[in-house]
Image (cartoon, rainbow, N blue to C red):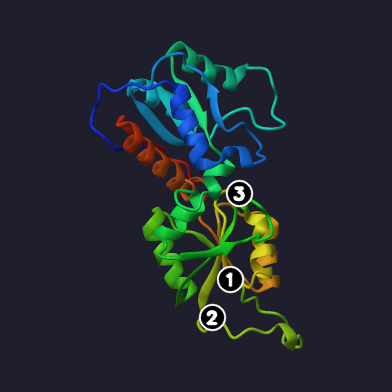
Amino acid sequence: MTAKDNLTEPSNTAITVQALTQFCDDYLSTDAFKDYAPNGLQVDGGQPIKRIVTGVTACEALIDAAIADNADAIMVHHGYFWKGEPEPITGMKGRRIRKLMQHGISMIGYHLPLDAHPVIGNNAKLAEMLGMTITGALYPHESHPVGNVAVCTPQTAETLIHTITQALGRVPLHISGNYDYPADDQSKQTTGTAARMIERVGICTGGAQDMIEQAAAMGCDAYISGEISERTTHSARELGIDYFACGHHATERGGIQALGALVAEQFGLPVTFIDIDNPA
């Protein structure tokens, strides 16, 4: 299942892939990040850019959709050539890159820079969608921190679950920080879920569930990310912080959509966001 969001009308404008990536590289300050994959141009399709497709992940389904849309470039959050992956361009990777090259489609990816950007980043856009205001960094002493701390109107976990569901189109998995410790352990007793209010929230989209300890250290009442691990449940209970696993894909649609809108405005090109459904 795919969903499309066209940002501009058809145009005769064409730009070079170098001009496109240079604009994005500069805007996102890519040189400032030490990442797990190259940011910027990853596959050069060798032709001018007239139409662009954006998406979260450069899977084969997105490539097929871009081919059907007659796109010259794909811009994504999750691209290729990740640290530690096999280097040969064979199998699944080979099929993907072969389709790009055969159809002259350039592939451009931005990972951590698109998570961290204070205006169009995944964290910033998620906070905006949830009616929260970012007040600082989850790791304030890092030069280019990825996670954020935000504040919201004091609300119960149930209210926040409803807000997340409305914003992302899926119900988050919620782990309450109100764990029922044994009655003789009075030092860890809580006041109950109904009385607990959430006002200070840590946010880091995608697979950042292990930042929950830092969120607790920063005095957050809750922490929002995309994925959950077995250990996350125990961390939330023992740290006394509510955790909301909202989906890796679902929490990282906002940044690439915002980047596409920016590119459409900057260059006057048709940009289409294609959402390849992913429950993870």
Closer to the eye: label 1 or 2:
2
Q: Is residue 201 above or below residue 74?
A: below
| Circles 1 and 2: CB atoms closer than 8 Å | yes
Q: Mark 1 or mark 3: which comes first in sequence?
A: 1
Placement of the N terminus among the 4 image quadrants:
top left
Which of marks 2 and 1 precedes in the sequence? 1
Q: CA distance from mark 1 to mark 3?
A: 19 Å
Q: Residue at x 49, y 49 (%)?
A: 121
Residue underneath mark 1: 176
Q: Residue at x 68, y 84 (%)?
A: 189
SS label for mark 2: loop
- Label 2 is placed on what type of residue? Arg
Residue marked by disc 2:
196
Counting residues from the start of the chain, the first of labels 3 and 2 encountered is 2
| Residue on which the image places disc 3 | 207
Is residue 229 visible to the viewer in this orientation of the structure? yes
